[in-house]
Image (spheres, grey):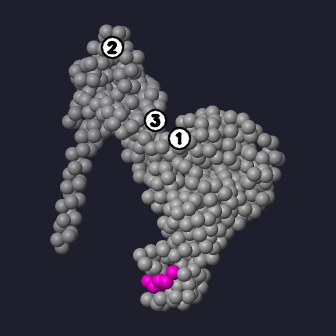
Amino acid sequence: MSDRPVLIHLEHVSKSFGNSLVLDDLDLTICKNEFVTLLGPSGCGKTTTLRIIGGFERPDSGRVIFQGEDITGVPANKRPINTVFQKYALFPHMTVEENVAFGLRIRKKSREYIREKIDYALKLVNLEGFEKRMPKSLSGGQQQRVAIARAIVNEPEVLLLDEPLGALDLKLRQEMQYELIRMKNELGITFIYVTHDQEEALTMSDNVVVMNQGYIQQEGSPQKIYDEPENAFVADFIGDSNIIRSTMVRDRLVNILGIEFECVDTGFGENRPVDVVIRPEDIVLAPEREGALNGEVTDVIFKGVHYEMCIMTGDFEWIVHSTRRSEPGSGVSISVDPFDIQIMNIPESEDEEAVKLDI
Amino acid sequence: MRDRAVNFITRFYLLLIFLFLYSPIAVLMVLSFNDSRSRVVWGGFTLKWYERMFTSPHITDALVTTLALAFFASLLAVLIGFPASFGICMLRRSGRSVMMTLVNIPLLDADIVTGISMMLFFMRFMELSFSSVLIAHTVFCIPYVILALMPRVEAVDWTPYESALDLGATQPYAFLRMVMPQLYSGIISGFFMSLTMSMDDFAITYFTKGAGVNTLSTMIYGEIRKGIKPELYALSTVIFMAVLILLLAVNVATRKKGGETGEGRAY
């Protein structure tokens, strides 16, 4: 993300509605031509962040810097930013064509220019031939495409997308994910995408910003967020995970549930309590007594690609993904590669603690 | 057998209700075509009372006053009630219920109290005239406009407004294009309710009107003291028909709209 020039910078942005603080001293940098996803549970402040960038909310404090200029007080209609709203927000009394042309007509573009742009945009979203239809006669997915077309004809520098796929069914959602990536590459503009769906975030983004309770929990590439979560909230929110309170014995050695495991992390000190994250698919199962930790299978669910198993070792329940089924009640043994053990600091501040309890 | 009896009784009852409601009006309508000043003798069919009605400056003046008063009072009430509904909607719960109670008081208050208090108020500050009646009518019409508009304002979908802003529209333009269409039916029903209330009013008009200003209701009241003239039958028939047609038109219009959007009728 650092090799691209900075486009938007939110500086110490705070916002509250009534008594509830939605964003607390948020700092966020978004680079040009990046696909950024704000990911988090509902009420985490992601939509408010988007609305502040779009100009629909004013922060209580802090600044919004766009290409080096302070645009905090600039109204939505004067920003080179367009939004695709959650509920599409198409104009119900206008045809598809009129919807798409709305922004261009306001900018008093020539008739030929508008015609050309409509054709281009509808082609981009695969809706050629729908010009004269009314929004009501379109399916959810089609309406969403019209909303995207309506936004991009204005050639914005940034496209904001507020859970645009939320109302679509699974199959359509997956198709649209590919479509969005394609559109982003074709248009070459910045996408800021808000979702609570971690799969969407991981699939499409260059950069994922995980948010909770008005704070940024972690920022980074999808791989980094998944493989190296910085705290228990991120680990738990992104994918399934086993989070175990453990002790860091020394560099590269951690004591998990009384057994010492080799790991690759350093710099956590000696004999310090830490949280350990191990992804369910990273756990290697072996016959009883052949691995590091012995346990008993308590539950097995078939998930299609793999089996999801619950394994009790002592009083800790592990979630394990494996393509091989072990019978409930049978004894197994668990081991983990050093690379697959992710060490995290235990939250210190109250805010971070609150985050953890909220999971 | 029993069903049939019940059916008959309910229908008969309904018929009775309509008979009581409408037979006096029917008698009046018949009398308006009666070529005789007597109320009990049928002297043959005539349209002369209608002719006299339209040539009597007395009546036509009152008609013009009534219509002008109703129109302008409703217009002013909409202009004032429209921003008021938005204001009340933006209030928090406690402030809103206080405002709504204040708005409702003039509706529940006896007309005669409103009328007399307004008269006293106007006499202190201005001459009683057409404008004092206009102010009085506007004031008592505002609550009707607010009542008709509030549910619409509350139900406004602001997302098209926001997308219009997002696409570069100015706030007034976005409001006009995206929010107003959602409010037209509320504005129209508020306007027509005001119109009806204004034309219907007697007490408040009677106390706040200046000398020489007469609406139909105050004019008829004055005339009746001198004895009932058959012209008044004709006038009442015309008013009744006008209101009936207006009501039917509004009903048909709102039903058509309601079918499209799945909403109920306004009346």
Q: Residue A15, labelled with which disc?
A: 1
Q: Per the image, is B258 magenta?
A: no
In the depicted view, which residue is nearer to us: A259 or B54?
A259
Residue B146 lies left or right of residue A265; in this view the side is left
Residue identified by numbered label 2: B122
Quadrant of residue B200 in the image? top left
Chain label for disc 1: A
Residue placed at 75% from the left, 62% from the top? Answer: A182
Pointer 3: residues within 10 angstroms few (<14), some, or many (20+)?
some
Marks 1 and 3 share the same chain:
no
Q: Nearer the viewer, residue B74 or B100?
A: B100
How many marks can you see?
3
> Mark on residue B103?
none
Subunit bearing disc 3: B
For the residue marked with disc 2, what is the amino acid? Answer: Phe
Residue named by callout 3: B86
Magenta segment range? A293-301
Relative vertical location of residue A162 with respect to residue B225 in this rendering, above or below = below
Question: Helix, strand or loop at disc 2?
Answer: helix
